[in-house]
Image (cartoon, rainbow, N blue to C red):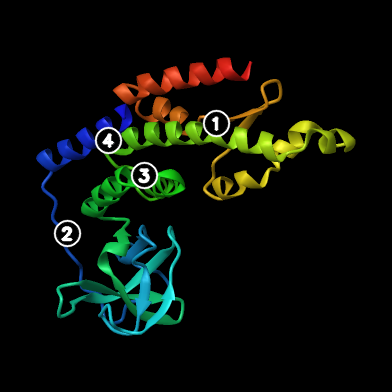
């Protein structure tokens, strides 16, 4: 709850102090196509809406659904259907179509950055962790980064406790002892960790307590990049607590 309040306050503060204007630069007629313009790179943040359609309409034939976290290139402007729903024209490999605006976030837009932060607040479970990871991957210099870094570490450490219970319930002690492999290798190869590892998350394992713990990378970044923030003070406490847990 404390971290959500920090994140909410950060969003509100930026809304009050910043005036953001977004402009689109015209594409030169003879510009080479070997590079994708950064201002046209978007990331999927809401897979529930991320359906590529033949036309800019919710009633148009769906072509393909995109996964959350996928990068996609805009190939045209925004169009609005008769119901006021807005669509981007997008390019996905050789596939072109229309995607609802709210499914995507520009990696260069402060407005979309804050929209993703609000979506994180409204999410739960793995969805919340994955959207937080997307934020940290694409918004490197965000003013919200300290709050999101602290939140991310707390979310992962919280899920580590749940994963510990699941692994201890599913991994059979007798079967593990019958193998020549070290006990920790079974825990660190546990399939429940897979989707978190795909996000770049590393879990430590305490052999004595048979529990997982977050390795604290987001807290370490907080201390390195934002040492004078309130979030860094909290991160230091988290790392000290982690050290005691791993002893």
Mark 1 / mark 4, whichever is N-terminal:
4
Badge 3 vs badge 4, beta-carbon distance below 8 Å: no
Q: CA distance from mark 1 to mark 2?
A: 43 Å
At 10% across and 47% down in the image, what residue appears?
19
Q: Say which mark, if any, is on residue 54.
A: none
Q: CA distance from mark 1 to mark 3?
A: 28 Å
Residue 162 on image: x %, y %: 55, 35
* Tag 3 secondary structure: loop
- Left-right relation of 215 to 141: right
* Tag 4 secondary structure: helix
Q: Nearer the viewer, residue 65 or 36?
A: 65
Q: Nearer the viewer, residue 73 or 25?
A: 73
Q: Residues within 10 Å of mark 1 (few under 14, many from 20)?
A: some
- Left-right relation of 160 to 116: right
Which quadrant of the view contains residue 154? top left
Q: CA distance from mark 3 to mark 2?
A: 19 Å
Residue 196 position (above or below residue 27): above
Q: Nearer the viewer, mark 1 or mark 4?
A: 1
Mark 3 / mark 2, whichever is N-terminal:
2
Identify residue for label 4. 7
Badge 1 vs badge 2, beta-carbon distance below 8 Å: no
Residue 245 position (above or below residue 135): above
Identify residue for label 2. 22
Q: Nearer the viewer, mark 3 or mark 4?
A: 4
Mark 2 / mark 4, whichever is N-terminal:
4
Residue 18 on image: x %, y %: 13, 43
Mark 1 / mark 3, whichever is N-terminal:
3
Residue 240 position (above or below residue 175): above
Q: Say which mark, if any, is on residue 161.
A: 1
* Tag 2 secondary structure: loop
Identify residue for label 3. 140
Mark 3 / mark 4, whichever is N-terminal:
4
């Amino acid at each position: 709850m404390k971290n959500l309040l920090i994140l909410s306050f950060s969003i509100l503060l930026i809304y009050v102090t910043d005036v953001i204007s977004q402009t689109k630069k015209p594409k030169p007629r003879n510009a080479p196509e070997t590079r994708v313009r950064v201002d046209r790179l978007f990331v999927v943040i809401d897979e529930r809406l991320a359906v590529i359609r033949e036309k800019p309409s919710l009633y148009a034939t769906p072509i393909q659904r995109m996964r959350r976290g996928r990068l996609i290139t805009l190939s045209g402007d925004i169009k609005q259907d008769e119901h006021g729903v807005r669509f981007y024209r997008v390019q996905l490999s050789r596939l072109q179509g229309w995607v609802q605006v709210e499914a995507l976030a520009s990696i260069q837009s402060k407005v979309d950055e804050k929209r993703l932060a609000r979506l994180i607040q409204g999410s739960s479970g793995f969805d919340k962790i994955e959207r937080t990871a997307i934020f940290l991957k694409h918004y490197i210099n965000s003013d919200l980064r300290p709050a999101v870094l602290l939140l991310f570490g707390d979310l992962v450490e919280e899920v580590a406790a749940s994963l510990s219970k699941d692994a201890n319930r599913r991994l059979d002690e007798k079967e593990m002892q019958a193998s020549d492999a070290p006990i920790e290798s079974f825990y660190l190869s546990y399939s429940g960790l897979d989707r978190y590892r795909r996000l770049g998350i590393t879990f430590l394992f305490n052999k004595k307590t048979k529990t997982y713990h977050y390795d604290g990378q987001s807290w370490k970044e907080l201390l390195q990049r934002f040492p004078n923030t309130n979030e860094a003070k909290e991160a230091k406490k988290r790392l000290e607590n982690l050290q005691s847990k791993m002893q």
